[in-house]
Image (tube, grey):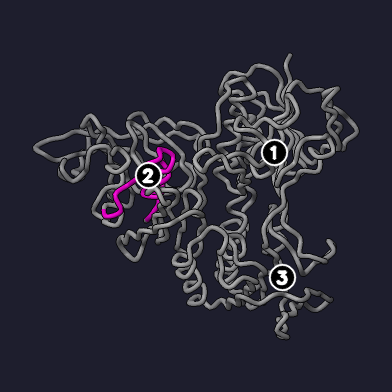
Amino acid sequence: MSHIVIIGAGECGARAAFALREKGFDGRITLVGEEEHLPYERPPLSKDALLHGHAPKLVSDAARYAEAGIAVLTGVTVESIDPTAKIVQLSNGTSRDYDQLLLTTGARPRPFPGLSGANHRIRTLRTHGDTVAIRAALQPDTHLAIIGGGFIGLELAATARKLGAQVTLVEGLPRILSRGVPEEVATVVADRHKAEGAEIICGVKIQELSEDRDGARIRLEDGRTIAADLIVVGIGAVPNVELAQDAGLVIDNGIAVDEHLRTSVPDIFAAGDCCSFPLRHYGGRRVRLEAWRNAQDQGLLAAANLMGAGEAIASVPWFWSDQYDLTLQIAGLADGTTQTIRRDMADGAFILFHLDAGGRLIAASGIGTGNAVARDIRLAEMMIAAGVRPDPVALAAAETKLKSLLAA
Amino acid sequence: MSNWVEVCATDEIDEEDVIRFDHEGKTFAVYRSPDDEFFATDGLCTHEKIHLADGLVMDDIIECPKHNGRFSYKTGEAKGAPVCVNLRTYPVKVEAGSVFISLA
């Protein structure tokens, strides 16, 4: 019987496993994950799970894996892949033969340069265990210092304020969210954090982080020192490529895959945060995305292609972040923008549409309370995929339904 | 006996669109399909309790605005990850230019 082994039991690997069954794969499926939990959703870790101390929100419960005939090995790492013999060696001393392999090994937090691993008061946030540890440390009036003004750092800042902690966030670049979020949108976010009582320090480099029994300290290059009870570092993620690299797969800012998610080695696919892939709607440029939706989409696509569908990656990058009652959503990639059109909506919500030199819509960034911008960002995503060149006047007019521009 | 509740005038919902309808502490989503029929479901996504009326209607599908979970609004059927629990549907009728749903 044909055997597909999936290495990495996060959103992507779990989705791929179920999708194989939904598409009628009748061979064996083994899903191997290093965490103790069944696959769970990571987005709540910086938000509701941290706020309320929830148990992990499982992608599916144990019964569904059993029902689908998916063997899940938790708390097990893969030590090596032999792509010639087609065997993976596991940390529990056993091995598995495979016919096809899917690597969904994900990413891990980028460590702060020069900092060793064994710190109690200097942490990162990626796993449920991280959330439990941070929650335990966050009492009212605890001083939390966050390094990095990206989505993780800002979501953590919002949740920590809700828990009553004092928050100082340090970003080395001149503003928060400088990777992929337009300044107009980032300003709304920064203002909200300041209004909620968080201190945000931008444009200052960090010289050193240190901790002792009583606390942790950030020494800034301008001479200032920030004392905190806990420091959380959120400066991006690095893809988990070592296993693939050791097996001889081509690595290029992640495990390099083609438009079908095939790696450089036959019968090995990769998907999700760990891989870099050519992005069709942007001239085939190679990107790596760290996003929940991408993990889902690529899990589904990998399943189809493991079964020989030969489908190419067609999705447009899409991200969201929730901070307080604000939701920010972004579709597409805005580099290459030559014209930006602003559409103002009810209650202060707005969307920026980014057009390239040829008038094609390449990205849309929106912010508002609740789901104010969701429907239009979704339509923008469909317009980007369709290569639409919308009329800028119509884009700016909130009364023009985007759906009508999609059809045009 | 059916408990028919008036939602709105038919022209208050565009074709291939949805509105939110709150009634006696419950929230519903009421849809008008591209072929001009009306449907109603529970208002919150079965994945994370998000108002579906903020989502996008495409043919006979409603897509959740938060995580893109999809349902058939005609049958309530969940159309795959991340949603796996079906949506409850309610009978709908149109009378004298108004849309009614049955909450019995």
Instruction: Please tell me whether mark 3 or mark 2 is closer to you in this view.
Output: 2
Highlighted magenta segment, given as a residue range: A373-393
As drawn, the residue found furthest toward the bottom would be A223
Q: Amino acid at mark 1?
A: Ala
Residue that mark 2 sits on: A379
- Residue B81 pos. (x, y %): 52, 35
Q: The disc labelled 3 sits on which kind of residue?
A: Ile
In the displayed structure, would residue A96 be above or below residue A78? above
Badge nearest the viewer, 1 or 2: 1
The residue labelled by disc 3 is A231
Give the residue drawn at x 67%, y 23%: A69
* One can see residue B61 in this view: yes
The residue wearing badge 1 is A256
Circles 1 and 2 in contact, beta carbons < 8 Å? no
- Residue closest to the eye, A316 or A155: A316
Q: Position of residue A408 (x, y in %)?
A: 28, 39
**Residue in the image at 39% along x and 46% along y:** A360
Q: Residues within 10 Å of mark 1 (few under 14, many from 20)?
A: many
Residues at marks 3 and 2, CA–CA distance in whole angstroms: 39 Å
Q: Is residue A52 something that shows in the picture?
A: no
Q: CA distance from mark 1 to mark 2?
A: 30 Å
Task: Describe the element under mark 3 as helix, strand or loop.
Answer: strand
Q: Quadrant of residue A373?
A: bottom left
